[in-house]
Image (spheres, rainbow, N blue to C red):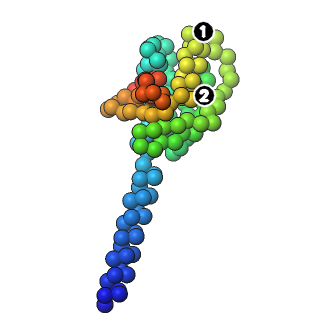
Amino acid sequence: MRKVTALLITILASVILSACAGTAEEENPLKGTVWSLETIGESAAYPGVDVIVDFGDGEVRGNTGCNDFNGQYKVKGDTIEFKDVSMTMMACQNPSLRAQENAFLNALQLARSYHTDGNMLELLDEYGETLMILRRY
């Protein structure tokens, strides 16, 4: 009887621990959310143009105001990493919008952590400086 009880406790503990470990790895609060650019650096987003960021299951896609983009992202705790980001190459005639697009893509590459506060998402660089702020779309 003791052996059976010990075996059952071992199996139960194993199931509980593996369930907890799987949940921690799979947790991604950005998955399934869509955001619109509010500020980049210290500048407000270009008026009348939506820069959209759509977070899927490890994939990110959206529009810079001129071009569509897509790539991969990884979240662990409050850290974030974007990689393999590519975009269409449509000509962006407006110089201000083109500059914002370049700043946006650069900010994605520099992002190392994030913070959410209600309907706001803040992407931060390795020093904790704000790169951009987005609003839930």
Looking at the picture, how far across and down is residue 81, in whole percent? 53, 37
Looking at the picture, how far across and down is residue 90, in whole percent? 67, 21
Compared to 95, does 129 lie above or below? below
Q: Whole-Å distance between the Cαs marked 2 and 1?
A: 18 Å
Label tally: 2
Number of the front mark, 2 or 1: 1
Numbered label attached to residue 32:
none
* Mark 1 lies on residue: 95
Q: State the residue at coordinates (37%, 28%).
A: 120
Residue 103: tell me if it is visible. Answer: yes
Residue sitting at the far front: 127
Looking at the picture, how far across and down is residue 127, in whole percent? 45, 27
- Quarter of the image with the N terminus is bottom left
Q: State the residue at coordinates (45%, 52%).
A: 25
Looking at the image, which is closer to me, 73 or 7?
A: 7
| Label 2 crowd (10 A; few <14 / some 14-19 / many >=20) | some
Q: State the residue at coordinates (58%, 14%).
A: 99
Secondary structure beneath label 2: strand
**Left or right: residue 129 compared with residue 95:** left
Which mark is first along the chain, 1 or 2?
2
Mark 1 is on which residue type? Pro
**Left or right: residue 117 compared with residue 106:** left
Mark 2 is on which residue type? Asp
- Quarter of the image with the C terminus is top left
Secondary structure beneath label 1: helix
Looking at the picture, how far across and down is residue 75, in whole percent? 47, 42
| Label 1 crowd (10 A; few <14 / some 14-19 / many >=20) | few
* Mark 2 lies on residue: 68
Quadrant of res 134? top left
